[in-house]
Structures are given as structure tokens and as C-alpha cells.
Image: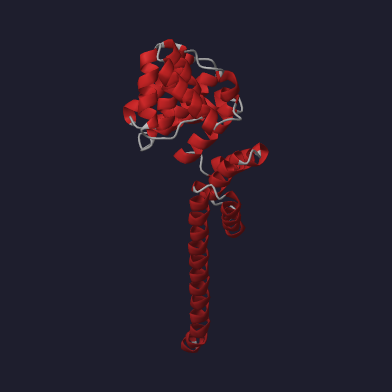
Amino acid sequence: MLRNLSKALKPLAFALCALVLVACASSAKKKAEADVYLQLGVRYLSMNKLEVAKENLERVLSMDSNNVQAHNALGFLYEKIEKYPEARTHYQTAFKLAPDDLSIQNNFGRFLCERREFDQGMELLGKAIANLLNDRLWLALTNAGLCQSGMGQQQKAKAYFKQALQVNSNYAPALLEMQKISYQNREYWLAKNYLQRYVSLAPQTAESLWIAIQTERALGNYGLANEYHNELLEKFPLSNQARQAGPVQQ
């Protein structure tokens, strides 16, 4: 009788195994498809093709609502289009799902500092800085420096930027901030040096050109100041810095 029961159950067991295998295969296929859309979304985001990036990242969440990296990327995307409540929602969701993720700590910490939520922002950035596995430490250090600048703590900000450059001497945003701080401290030759290092890596900004004009004026290099002035008007004619620059003294 037991033998007959065993024979009767075998087809059912095989059927159940087949269902499990089909479910696993379907799940693996869905995950692979979501990964493709995630890669596309991040890639388009890096190319500043925001609409198509958004479509791909939202497609990921339609397949996997707990996809941490999709939430993190959408937080960054919504920041770029100045939809800050939506950005916050995605960052918060990503952080709840993966509070130890370095990228989320860095992005959400910076976001909070820019919203003047300095204590919460610095707490997250501090965790990213303290993590020995952080292989992009200069990002968190620079963001911590920017947070300190927002708090009016220029000496602490300077220390963070210098640490960032010790880790990565070619990190352009940290060089730009050190140009600004050096100019503010009337260390004009240092400001000039930081700008030269910056422009070898990244294009000028309206602010970097404005500081360059003031720096060269302070050094008595009116010809070079005039060149920077013309570049500012040519590249950023509608900027506040262009309106502030005024005529160059001869």
C-alpha cells in the first residue's frame, strides 16, 4: 500500500519541483531585466538625459519596489530637476532599505546639508568618512567640507577639502572650493595655483572666473584679469558673476 502511495505521489512531487523551477527562472529573468533597466537609467542620468533616465529607473521600481540603487538614483535625478520633496522621499526610502550603503550616506547627507539640516547631514557624511571600505573617500570629505561651509565653519571646511585632496589630488570640486577659500583668506597666489590645477581637469564656472578676475586684480595682473573678464562675459553672460564683475581696471 505504501509503495502504491509513493508511486501516486511521485508525479505530484515532480510537478511541484517544476513549478518551483519555473518560479525561480521567472524571478531570475525579472531580476536580470530590472538590472538592465537600472544600468540604462544610471547611464542616461550620467549623460544628463533625464527624461529617459527617469523612465528606466521607474521601470525598475515597477519590477522591484525595494531596489535601493533605483531609489538612490531617482533621488539624485529629482534633485537635478529641483523636485526636492520627491528627491527626499526616494533618499529616505533608500536609506531605510540600506542604511550602511556608502553612496546613499553620501548623497543623502549632502542633500540634507544643502537643505540646511546640517546635523543630520554631517551624521551621515561622518559615517561615510569613517567607513574603512570607502574607496571614494574624497567625495564624502568634500561634501562634509561643503556642509561646514554652509554652517559658516570655514576652518573646518578647509580641513575637509585638504583631506579630500590628499586622498585624490585631482578632484576638481575640492580644488574649486580651495580656490574660493584661498581668495577669501587673501592668499592670492594659492588661489591662482588652485585655479590652474582645476582648469587642467574641468571647465571654468562663472564663480571660478569671477574669483580669478578678483585674484589677478589683487596681484596686479590686469591683462590676465581682462582675459578672464572676457571669458566670463562670453561663457556666462547672464550670470550674477558677470553682472558683478564690472569693467577691468587698466
Residue at the (39%, 31%) spot, across then down? 199
As drawn, is 158 to the left or to the right of 82?
A: left
**Picture mark count:** 0
- Here the colouring is secondary structure
Whether 56 is drawn above or below 198: the answer is below
Relative to 15, does residue 183 appear above or below in the rendering?
Answer: above
Residue closest to the far front: 250
Q: Nearer the viewer, residue 12 or 78?
A: 78
Quadrant in the rendering for residue 198: top left
Q: Nearer the viewer, residue 156 or 227?
A: 227
Residue 37 at x, y percent in the picture: 52, 58
Residue 25: where, in percent of width, then height?
Answer: 48, 70
Q: Residue at x 52, y 24 (%)?
A: 147
Q: Which residue is found at the position 47% from the left and 40% from the top?
A: 103
Front in this rendered view, residue 162 or 99: 162
Q: Position of residue 22 (x, y in %)?
A: 51, 74
Q: Nearer the viewer, residue 161 or 187?
A: 187
Is any part of residue 186 visible from this angle? no
Rendered position, 76 above or below 171:
below
Q: Is residue 16 visible?
A: yes
Asked if residue 14 is positioned above or below residue 107 in the image, the reply reads below
Query: Splitting the image into 4 quarters, where does residue 191 fall?
Result: top left
* Residue 186 horizontal/vertical position (percent): 43, 10
Q: Which residue is pictured at 55% across the width and 40% down the height?
A: 95
